[in-house]
Amino acid sequence: MILWTILPFITVLSSIAQESNSMLFSFGVITDVQYVDAETAGTRHYRSSPAKLTAIVDSLNTQKVDFVIHLGDLIDRDFASFDPLVKILGNLTMPVHHVLGNHDFSVKQEQIKTVPDKLGMPSRYYAINHQGIRFIVLDGNELSIYGQKEGSKAHKKASNKLELLKSAGAKNAQAWNGGLSPKQIKWLKSQLDDASKKNEKVIVNCHFPLLPAGDAHNLWNDQEVKALLASYPNVLAWFNGHNHKGGYHQADGIHYVNFKGIVEKTDAPWAVVEVYADHLIINGHGTEPDRLLEQY
């Protein structure tokens, strides 16, 4: 039986953690920087994102986390928008691991394939291991109409999938969402199987949420992926961005944490996640809340 609780004050979280066991390591989480040199649109303050990111990088360096995960949408649009942000992230004193978001592909057709290289990614989806935790990074844009070159087989498959979702009345049948291909789902299962054999716990990272069910921001094949994760008791959490409002849900003993978007007009949200043997602590900064994610 898994019980999850959320406590409001980090002082309480820290005291509980100390009574339990020592921290194994920590890592930073940021998402939806979504920069472009453009005027503010609604609540999105594009030009403020570099300054926000600079301040976050400075803070992360003082926190001495082991690495940082960016959950997608580093830019809003235009390939040139990557340059100032990549330069800022280069000031980190620890590695940064990128997840691809839908806006990261708001570039010219011929530039789509170069986005992962620009971010220094080993591939569009991959896994890393750190002190007994396997971090799986998924590409929720693989099956999408924007993340594949127009006229390609992959683009046609994505267009067909979108039309099927629309005909079924799915709320996530949006052109700015995407999904995992059957090939990537097979790869995900192989990663989960291998992690189980090696007694590794798993944190899955994707730009798109799986919960709440029926949400307009969800991954196209959200229920299929959710059912797969539910069959592995070593899966601790699913971390995502995309929905800038953020949120938290629990299902089948798994955390589903939606981190808030930096591009919004509010104080820049970001987090440091502390990893313990039997729980995670999310230390929120800006408008990102603190959370104790406890496993019994």
Image (cartoon, rainbow, N blue to C red):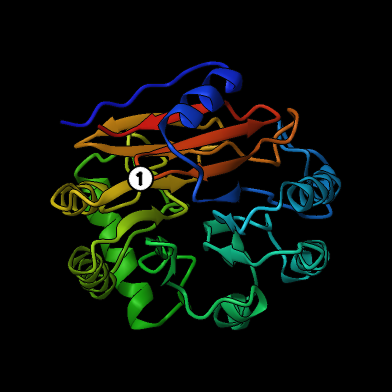
Image vertical order of residue 10 relative to residue 261, above or below: above
Residue at 53 percent across and 35 percent down: it is 282
Q: Is disc 1 placed on a helix, strand or loop?
A: strand
> Mark 1 Cα within 10 Å, few/some/many (few <14, many 20+)?
many
Image vertical order of residue 67 relative to residue 83, above or below: above
Closer-to-camera residue (152/130): 130
Residue at 31 percent across and 52 percent down: it is 220
Location of the N terminus (image quadrant): top left
Location of the C terminus (image quadrant): top left
List x then y, in percent, for residue 139: 42, 65
Q: How many marks?
A: 1
List x then y, in percent, for residue 250: 29, 31
List x then y, in percent, for residue 70: 59, 56
Q: Which residue is mark 1?
A: 237
Residue at 71 percent across and 31 percent down: it is 42
What is the quadrant of residue 156 in the picture? bottom left
Residue at 16 percent across and 48 percent down: it is 227
Closer-to-camera residue (31/39): 31
Instruction: Please give left or right for residue 52 compared with residue 276 in the image.
Output: right
Instruction: Please give left or right for residue 187 compared with residue 79 in the image.
Output: left
List x then y, in percent, for residue 75: 68, 58
Instruction: Please give left or right for residue 282 compared with residue 190 in the image.
Output: right
Instruction: Please give left or right for residue 95 compared with residue 240 in the image.
Output: right
What is the quadrant of residue 261 in the picture? top right
Amino acid at dot 1: Ala
Closer-to-camera residue (103/96): 96
Image vertical order of residue 90 relative to residue 251, above or below: below
